[in-house]
Amino acid sequence: QSVVTQPPSVSGTPGQRVTISCSGSNTDIGTNSVYWFRQFPGAAPELLIHQIDQRPSGVPDRFSGSRTGTTASLAISGLRSEDEADYYCAVCDDSRGGVVVFGGGTKLTVL
Amino acid sequence: EVHLEESGGTLVKAGRSLRLSCVTSGFSFGDYAMTWIRQAPGKGLEWLGLIRNRASGGTPLYAASVKSRFSISRDDSRGIAYLQMNTLNTEDTATYYCARDRSLSYGGSPGWLDPWGRGTLVTVSS
């Protein structure tokens, strides 16, 4: 069982804005950088957001990350059908010796 | 172009050992920590561990769930990271990915995994 909690699923219609939450504690999300990854079916995960709110080159600004307290969020605006994928947050957990923990993943469905 | 490719995945009987390789190219391998992650069929991602670069001590860090059975090593001269898995059981059936961890290069906490390899499938039969 993950110590970092994500909703199993979220959905939205094209053009909408959706958010995916990643809830943790003071020893992980409350202290360390949060990372977001996207995974399409049958493919390897890819980095979407690093250091809470930074986008790698090539990631459109429709994707944004934030953190409030011990909860991080990934927001996707202007939802497109091609955004349908699994999304994972990851963070270092100081209470577990600095290992990385992934959230359980969120399946985004574009209706 | 930065490239990572895993190999070594196969069908193996429970109790046996297996070593996976992550062959890299396109970057200065010795400057980065390397990480292994797995994904059981239909399940989420599980971080297994990393090996730091030489400048950070070259030491490994493991998830508690695999610490007693798995070990990670690296060959900086060849740009390869390894995952040695011992006493495999059916719960180790998964796709295994390697990824470059960029965060440790600037002194940050691990997790900045970019890029990832395509993965290699390990199937453990009983």
Image (cartoon, rainbow, N blue to C red):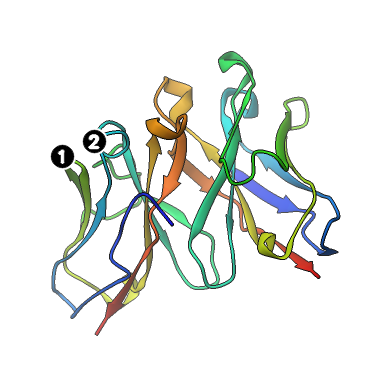
Residue B10: x and y in percent read 81, 63
Name the residue rendered at 56%, 41% in the picture. Answer: B63
Q: Which dot marks residue B123? A: none
Name the residue rendered at 38%, 30% in the picture. Answer: A94
Return the residue at label 1.
Answer: A69
Q: Amino acid at mark 2?
A: Gly
Q: Which dot marks residue A30? A: 2
- Of B120 and B18, nearer the camera is B18
Quadrant containing the N terminus of chain B in the rendered view = top right
In the displayed structure, B109 sits above or below A48; it is: above
Q: In the rendered view, does A57 fall on the left or right side of A41?
A: left
Outermost bottom residue: A111
Residue B87: x and y in percent read 80, 51
Gap between marks 2 and 1 measured at Cα = 6 Å
Q: Do the residues bearing badges 2 and 1 touch, measured as CB atoms within 8 Å?
A: yes
Helix, strand or loop status at disc 1: loop
